[in-house]
Image (spheres, grey):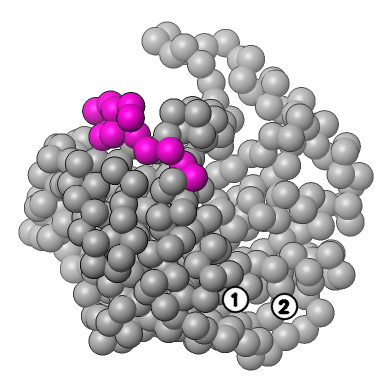
Amino acid sequence: MAADEAGARYPVEALRDFTYRVFVRAGMPEADARIETDSLIEANLRGVDTHGITRMLVIYVQRLRCGAVNPQPQPRIVSETPSTALIDGDNGMGAVVANWAMRQCIRKAREAGSAWVGVRNSNHFGTCAFWAMQAAAQDMVGFATTNGPSNMAPWGGVTPYMSTNPLAFAVPASGGRTVVVDMATSVAAKGKIILAAKKGLKLPEGWAMDKRGRPTTDPNEAIEGLVMPLGGHKGYALSLMIDIICGILTGADFGPHIGKLYGDFDRSQNLGHLFSAIDIARWVPVEELKARVGQMWQEVTSVELAEGSTRIYIPGEIETEETARRLEQGIPIPPAVVKEFADLGAELGVPFPG
């Protein structure tokens, strides 16, 4: 088994099988367990370990087993028009609910040209990119965003109110490529700070503040403190708006009223999501758009390099290359997480492939 500074590398399919069987043993139907597993494994493949099994598997299972999340939800459409829908997620696992909602969004976009689907009564759904890319795979422009538990203060304050509230866009390009923007409204996602603490690493300057609002590179102080908004007041404003359209617009909770992922084990998170899809063919021929995006791709990555730079990437390109590497070499799992998986597997009767 290969190893590097991030930990030993494990075969992708072995980790996929382990994760799937853990979710089934935790009470999820097999089809839902597959959806949740695929969402997490895809995050790890793309190098977004903060949203993969590396960080999420143990806490997801803990919330399932204590009853904070409904393991067998029945999402339903509360209201709809030809191009919109509001969905109640029945407190299901976030990826299960998001998958159901994005399918509705793509279907409506195919029929109406574009669609917006809002969700309430859901939970953490993994990466936004996973859902936006589903639309791109159907020759559509995809968009996904969600709110989350408060860990970022309004600009100028020190009291957590809003989350890192991420968003993603995905657009298909020529050659089977996809432009994918997936970003938090903070300098760094809270998950990266938690993962740094598990690895015993310091944080880069400018990522976080302690609970008194002082800059810190100590991930443990940052966990108790605040993440920094991206671009100062601009990240704060964007996060606030996402909370409005995901939380208030859908009837979900918002700001500090949202249930904590690593706490509040007696209640739902009641997160809100918002998805959109645009049928490219209603605007321009699909192949024409892909060719022109491909042209842009070539032109952008061919501009003169700044001093010290070796390459220009299109958003999503690094993750695509990392996926290819990890499919070949395996997914790295830090030693502390390996122990968590081994303990969880022993408890559920699903041996970890170590």
Q: Position of residue 70 (x, y in %)?
A: 43, 83
Q: Residues within 10 Å of mark 1 (few under 14, many from 20)?
A: many
Q: Position of residue 324 (x, y in %)?
A: 54, 30
Instruction: Give amino acid for label 1.
Output: Gly
Q: Is residue 121 magenta?
A: no
Query: Is residue 89 depicted above or below 45 in this figure?
Result: below
Q: Position of residue 189 (x, y in %)?
A: 33, 51
Instruction: Give amino acid for label 2.
Output: Thr
Kindly tell me whether residue 185 is visible in this rendering.
Answer: no
Location of the C terminus by quadrant is top left
Q: Which residue is mark 2?
A: 84
Q: Give 63 or 106, whichever is nearer the viewer.
A: 63
Q: Within the image, what quadrant is residue 153 found in?
A: bottom left
Q: Position of residue 177 (x, y in %)?
A: 69, 34
Q: Residue furthest bottom?
A: 78
Query: Is residue 112 depicted above or below 277 in this figure?
Result: below
Q: Give 320 or 168, whichever is nearer the viewer.
A: 320
Q: Is residue 7 magenta?
A: yes
Real-space Cα distance between discs 2 and 1?
8 Å
Query: Is residue 156 depicted above or below 80 in this figure?
Result: above
* Residue at 50% across, 28% down: 328
* Residue at 37% across, 38% down: 10
Please report whichever mark, 2 or 1, sits nearer to the chain's N-terminal start.
2
* Range drawn in magenta: 1-13
Q: Which residue is mark 1?
A: 118
The reply to whether the C-beta atoms of the residues labelled 2 and 1 are less than 8 Å apart is yes
SS under mark 2: strand
* Residue at 52% across, 84% down: 73
